[in-house]
Image (tube, rainbow, N blue to C red):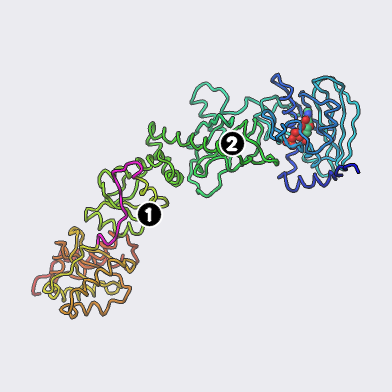
Amino acid sequence: MADQAFQVDLRGVVDLLSRHLYASPRVYLRELLQNAVDAITARGGGGGRVVIETGGGALRVHDDGVGLTADEVHTLLATIGRSSKRDELGFARHDFLGQFGIGLLSGFLVADEIEVVSRSARGGDAVRWTGRSEGGYRVEPGERDEPGTTVTLRPRPGSAELLSAPVVAELARTYGSLLPIELVVDGVAVTGDGPPWRASYPGPAARRRALERYCEELYGFTPFDVVDLEVAEAGLSGVAFVLPEPVSPTARAAHRVYLKRMLLAESVQGLLPEWAFFVRCVVDAGELRPTASREALFEDELLESAREGLGEVLRQWLVRLAETDPPKLRAFLRLHQLGVKAMALHDDAMLRIVDRWMEYETSAGPMTLHEFRRRHPDGRFTGSVEEFRRLSAVAGAQGVGLVNGGYVHDTEIIERLPDLDPDVRLTRLDAAELTTTFGVLDPAAELALRPFLATAQRAVERLGCEVVVRDFDPASLPALYLTSRDAQFREELSRAREEAGELWADVLGAVGATTGVERPQLVLNYRNPLTRRVTALGADGPVEPAVQALYGQALLLGHHPLRPADTAVLNRSFIGLLEWAVHPPEAGQ
Ligand SMILES: Nc1ncnc2c1ncn2[C@@H]1O[C@H](COP(=O)(O)OP(=O)(O)OP(=O)(O)O)[C@@H](O)[C@H]1O
């Protein structure tokens, strides 16, 4: 028995295309336009003209391309999936936009009948092919003098709008305005000077201004900078517009992509490396392949290397900015530091930029990591912002350089610094390093302080903290406020208490009794001369406002949030101290 061919219901196929392949029936015009451009390319010789006419209840697309012979019409237009534009391996031949052999079918998204009148540039008579959406077609002699093709669609009821003059003009402009041929819709030229980044301008400033305007029209923002893009192997050229506002790195950046100067789509993803989320691009690529829907890029090795190439161009731009325009680089880093830091995780050039130009919080004020390493070759960093806030004053006062590595990527960046500079290694701060210097007082001093401690405790009792006196470095630090989270400090203190043994139990008993497990502590530094004088104030001295002032200062130094009660106490202590300064009560009065 002879093999039978499948009977394919064309309406089913078109239905499938419209539901699952094409995003919108608007693509019909793109497909017609693309076939016309391919035919012009196939004819060769440069130039070429596509004329689109609306009105009279039909849409006509004329091209002066290579045309079709009667035989070609039979083989190419009667078989779905057959394309003249593929080689044996099924890859699109270099010059053409089409490759799948389904484009013409999209005409059935908006019309029940497609008419093709063609005359081949290779000779032969003109031919007319009429295909119907239910699957039949007819081939007969056509009338046409010049080589080329005219495709005619008559809208099916409900599709008239899509084939109307304004919609057709808009679609032609959207898809075809950069085409290297002449495209005319209802007598109006659609194509102009081609890609704006390729056009010639009186000078660099004029070019820059024109590209900025182009960005404003397309994307609605004035770019921070304009970067020319070029990746030869992908036949790609274009521009990247650097966003003038920070964006979330997780927002998927989408770009406007043209293939052989026909718009592929306005928001194509996956063109750039993920870290390059701070630009919007417009590119034209000759070698990249579309997916069958022609709305996205086909993910293959070429796309992958194009992506790398584009990443490299942007990286170079940054490196150049660092060399030629540091203030602008700093402004850029302020805007897009997250992206740059993400890059620095994998890229030494970016790491160097971060190292030299990005400012970090350090115990000696804001500075770059480079400067910090110079000043503190064996400095420390913290893994969290909170730890930095808590410890930077103590560390700084003890001469330990501390840098805040608590923001996103910062710890990894700091740990990668030896890649740039093998001799210098910043290490993570071990909080215990700073606590080892906490010392208890000698018993006599502690005993003598008892009355003071009782008064001091009353002064801050309502603020919920416990006052202790210890002897620690740095001497310049009068007091330290430790919250319940500062477990290490706490342990250190209670260990000191234990080590003090029997003799101390009595002395420390009062404090110990009130020490709920989680009470914050105000640790007064006996090594600090001012604090020591405060502890020596007699019962008639301004103990209360002085302790409250130390409390306030410890809060501020540790970057602890001030509650309303804290602010009130600070105020009171200030006024209290001021009164003492102005009217010290006479002794014995
Ligand atoms: N305007 C035209 N001039 C000359 N030949 C044409 C024209 N339109 C279509 N053809 C021929 O008909 C064939 C089928 O066209 P169709 O649009 O269905 O597929 P394609 O362009 O090859 O691929 P794609 O599905 O990617 O568009 C084409 O390969 C081409 O040879």
Residue drawn 29% across the image and 45% down it: 424
The kind of residue on which mark 1 rests is Gly
Q: In this rendering, does residue 335 appear at all?
A: no
Q: Nearer the viewer, mark 2 or mark 1?
A: 2
Q: Give the residues in magenta.
A: 418-434
Does ligand 1 reach within 8 Å of label 2's beta carbon?
no
Q: In this rendering, does residue 171 appear at all?
A: yes
Residue 32: x percent and y percent? 76, 33
Q: Which residue is mark 1?
A: 406
Residue drawn 21% across the image and 74% down it: 497
Residue 42 lies left or right of residue 469; in this view the side is right
Residue 48 lies left or right of residue 239; in this view the side is right
**Which image quadrant is residue 160 in?**
top right
Residue 427: x percent and y percent? 31, 52
- Residue 188 versus residue 353 in the image, above or below: above
Q: Nearer the viewer, residue 198 or 500?
A: 500
Q: Nearer the viewer, residue 28 or 89?
A: 89
Q: Which residue is mark 2?
A: 302
The kind of residue on which mark 2 rests is Leu
Which residue is at the far front? 1
Crowding near pointer 1: few (<14 within 10 Å), some, many (20+)? some
Q: Is 426 a magenta residue? A: yes
Q: Quadrant of the C terminus?
A: bottom left
Residue 190: x percent and y percent? 69, 28
